[in-house]
Image: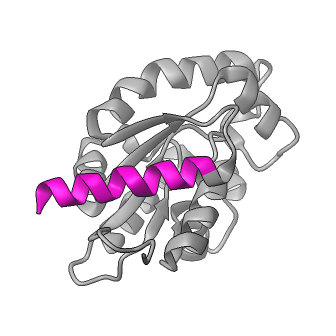
Amino acid sequence: MNPADGISKNIVLIGLMGCGKSTIGRKLQTLLGYPLVDTDQLIEEKAGMAVADIFARRGEPYFREVESAVLNELSAPGGPRRIIATGGGIIGRKANRKLLAQLGYVVWLQAPVDVILQRTGRNRDRPLLQTENPREKIERLMTERSPLYHEIADLELETAGLETGEIAGGILESARYHFAAKA
């Protein structure tokens, strides 16, 4: 059986930084053969600079504007089926949440604070973690964003302790069931 059988739309990965969106996205790309689109990479291409530089030079509000523009472009009718890995804060705007929900099967990847800190601790390209207390920042972001992720998620999945293949396989089975039920 072709892994893409029954998957009629995009698979959209949401969640905080360090929860595994890029890693799981690459595994899903391998399994499905769908292109992987990373919204942060598209933002960098559109702005002509790295995310950290956008935050430093133009600020978070500018970044969020470009992020929304990129999401609007991805939502254009007639696009190919894709795996879409989003930035953690993309769900902050109501219009973005609506577009994400319309794009396809939305999977909220989750991880505990300690796991996120371990995965992001050495990465200087995380502007929101360039703070005196990254743990406190992550905890605050979790508290603020969790209801927004929950609002649009078709599947909520804890990634800590699971292998990438197990996570991707679970997402594919759940997506097939989801799309079959809607057919």
Quadrant (top left, top right, bottom left, bottom right) of the N terminus: bottom left
Name the foreground residue: 26 vs 128: 26
Q: Based on the displayed image, in which of its 4 quarters is residue 168 positioned? A: bottom right
Read off the magenta span. 166-183
Residue at x 69% of width, y 45% of height: 163
Q: Is residue 47 visible?
A: no
Secondary structure that dominates the magenta span: helix
Q: Position of residue 132 (x, y in %)?
A: 80, 20
Name the foreground residue: 83 vs 49: 83
Residue at x 60% of width, y 48% of height: 166
Q: Is residue 89 visible?
A: yes
Q: Position of residue 43 (x, y in %)?
A: 54, 66
Is residue 57 depicted above or below 162 in this figure? below
Residue at x 77% of width, y 18% of height: 133
Residue 31 in the figure: left or right of residue 50: left
Q: Based on the displayed image, in which of its 4 quarters is residue 93 positioned? A: top left
Name the foreground residue: 5 vs 29: 5
Residue 77 in the figure: left or right of residue 86: left
